[in-house]
Image (cartoon, rainbow, N blue to C red):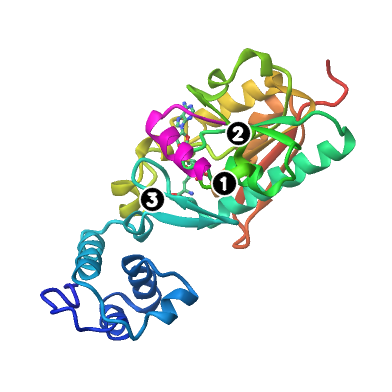
Amino acid sequence: MTGPASGGDGTISWRRLLDETAAITGRPQARWLCEEASGAFGDEFLEVQSHAVTERCIAHLDAMLARLRDGEPLQYVLGHWSFRRLDLLVDPRVLIPRPETELVAELAIDLARSLAAQRPGRPLPVADLGTGSGAIGLSLAAELPRGLVDVWLTDVSPDALDVARANLAGLGMAGAGVQFGHGEWFEALPSSLHGELAVVVSNPPYIAPDDPEVAPDVRRWEPALALFADDHGLAHVRTIAAGASSWLRPGGWLVLEIGAGQGSAVADVLRDAGLCEVAVRRDLSGRDRIASARRDPGEN
Ligand code: SAM
Ligand code: GLN
């Protein structure tokens, strides 16, 4: 891969630069990169196709191509990526939000909505533990009607919380009830929430450190803290399940993203923690992907 227009004299059009970039990266990536370099997205980019590209934009495009050439994931190179309705800032301080995690967020949103319908009144406290970019928790805040939930975003990584805070800024008024906690899993939350949480959702690190199937670019570029967990990938799931059994309110739900093949082991962990209505869902490719469980509604 080499820069398509380095040393250009500023007279190339975006249409031509797009074609030249596509010859290097393929068409969809070229479109994303040229939109980013031009600052014109979607229909706006179509409108600038005949415009001359400035030296500054060419330099920006060349810099992005150099990073891609080095193997850096496209999402980090662009600096943002879409997740459900949000366009999230992402960089190597956080995991790149995955499409399968959109289903985790959806289940948490549905469960929060139905709990709120059963008990209208004060906003329900919900927590996204290990929030990274804020993808899951900010989706709850953005998609649920205002005043329905108070969302807590936590992470052990101060860097990740900085990214999540920056993403909160993009939410406008929908982000009004969002709060942050720094620390290990439930320890990041104020003790006043103990026994009060309506929904706890988490995409914890669940990959065994020696898993041979982890893609080399994932291992090289994404934060190890976001990916790997001891005990065959289940160490954090155990901690979260144990905490959920007392931090959830009776009837509250825990929703976890899990790894392919972890369904039955995670279901055992959830039952051993005393949770009920344990269920494992698969994704479209038939792999275990989400585990959910509930604190017994009759428990006090
Ligand atoms: N929620 C984001 C998503 O779904 O895209 C990021 C998930 S990433 C797989 C796991 C997150 O858990 C990372 O942001 C990582 O920093 C955080 N994490 C790792 N160990 C943790 C711990 N002991 N306590 C709290 N968060 C932790
Ligand atoms: N789905 C991510 C991957 O396969 C892993 C995320 C996680 O450990 N929670 O790279």
Amino acid marked by disc 2:
Val
Image coordinates of residue 57 in percent, x first then y, are 25, 68
Q: Which mark is residue 214?
A: 3
Amino acid marked by disc 1:
Leu
Q: Which sits earlier in the primary sequence, circle 2 or circle 3?
A: 2
Q: Residue at x 19, y 66 (%)?
A: 59
Is residue 194 or residue 13 the one in the foreground? Answer: 13
Please give the residue where the numbered disc 1 appears in the rendered image. 171
Q: Which residues are magenta?
A: 153-169
Q: Residue at x 52, y 41 (%)?
A: 168
Mark 2 and mark 1 in contact? Answer it, CB < 8 Å.
Answer: yes
Please give the residue where the numbered disc 2 appears in the rendered image. 178
Would you call the spot at circle 2 few (<14 residues within 10 Å), some (14-19), or many (20 or more)? some
Q: Rounded to the nearest whole Å, what is the CA distance between mark 3 and mark 1?
A: 33 Å
Residue 84 appears in which quarter of the rendering?
bottom right
Q: Residue at x 80, y 28 (%)?
A: 122
Q: Which sits earlier in the primary sequence, circle 2 or circle 1?
A: 1
Mark 3 vs ligand 2: CB under 8 Å?
Answer: yes
Label 1: which secondary element: loop
Amino acid marked by disc 3:
Val
